[in-house]
Image: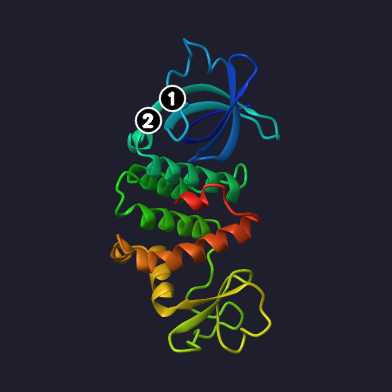
Amino acid sequence: MAAIRTLALVIRSVDVFETSRVLTLYTRELGKVSALAKGARRLKSPFQSGLDLLSVCDIVLLHKASEALDLLTEAVLAERYEALTHDTAALYGGCYVAELLDALTDRHDPHPRLFDASRVTLRHLGDPVSRPSRILRFELACLRELGLMPALDTCVHCGQPPSPTEGDRVAFGLATGGVLCPGCRPGQPHVATLSGDTLEAIRALASPGDAWKATWGDPETLGPVRSTVGAVISHLIGRRPRLLPFV
């Protein structure tokens, strides 16, 4: 077993035995891991307050190559997100971030940029104006980093630009993974029809830079985006995320 130090976000915690916990951690260097924290529930825990749900901690764990649980030996709090302790909407958003990391990622498959995106998102969930856009941006970051991003610029089947069909409407295949041109649309299952504005908003939210900030505080634009991105996520994991209705 190798001792590894890394930053970790606590995304799930289950009490076991009388004094211990099994944790699901999303780490920067190792990706998602499951670890046993012996004695974590004792009053004088060796981990202090470093293992609270949705906190980031600097950990040392004994990493096992097999499917067995890793063993957590050290954990020091690195960052706590105060808004999550007193703002219910922010807490729901944070729990949704954790749910997506658990549902979409595989064990021992690191994505450092996704870890960093998680921290940035959690850090700003206390702002009610930007919160809906930040959560959508995080969802799209998950899809991009994990190779699951829908095609937004060309038809997912033929690669041609998705010419609008009726006025400013574009077909979007939830099952096929992106926009569809008029020639490829017939016969495709689970197709939504998006306005040009909705597609542009999704592109902005998925792109680097600051264009996505134009969506802040714009429920008319974000409503259809939320429906579309939520449907894509639900299709990928085979169910609707439990926290999705609350974000």
Report x, y in % for residue 221: 37, 68
Vertical side of 191 occupied by 110: above or below: above
- Disc 1 is placed on an element classified as loop
As rendered, which of 161 and 43 lies closer to the eye?
43
Q: Position of residue 241 (x, y in %)?
A: 57, 51
Say if 90 sits above or below 16 in the image.
below
Q: Quadrant of residue 38?
A: top right
- Residue 142, position as x, y percentages in the image: 50, 55
Q: Is residue 18 left or right of residue 161?
A: right
Question: Which residue shows up at 66% across the image and 78% down it?
Answer: 188
Residue 37 visible in the displayed image: no
Q: Is residue 70 left or right of residue 60?
A: right
Q: Does the rendering let one see residue 237?
A: yes
At label 2, the amino acid type is Ala
Q: Which mark is residue 78?
A: 2
Residue sitting at x 38%, y 37%: 84
Q: Residue at x 44, y 43 (%)?
A: 92
| Residues at marks 1 and 2 touching, judged by CB atoms closer than 8 Å | yes
Q: Which residue is mark 1?
A: 50
Q: Nearer the viewer, residue 229 or 71?
A: 229
Quarter of the image for residue 212 reads bottom left
Q: Work out which residue is located at the far top of the displayed protein and give it.
A: 44
- Label 1 to label 2: alpha-carbon separation: 8 Å
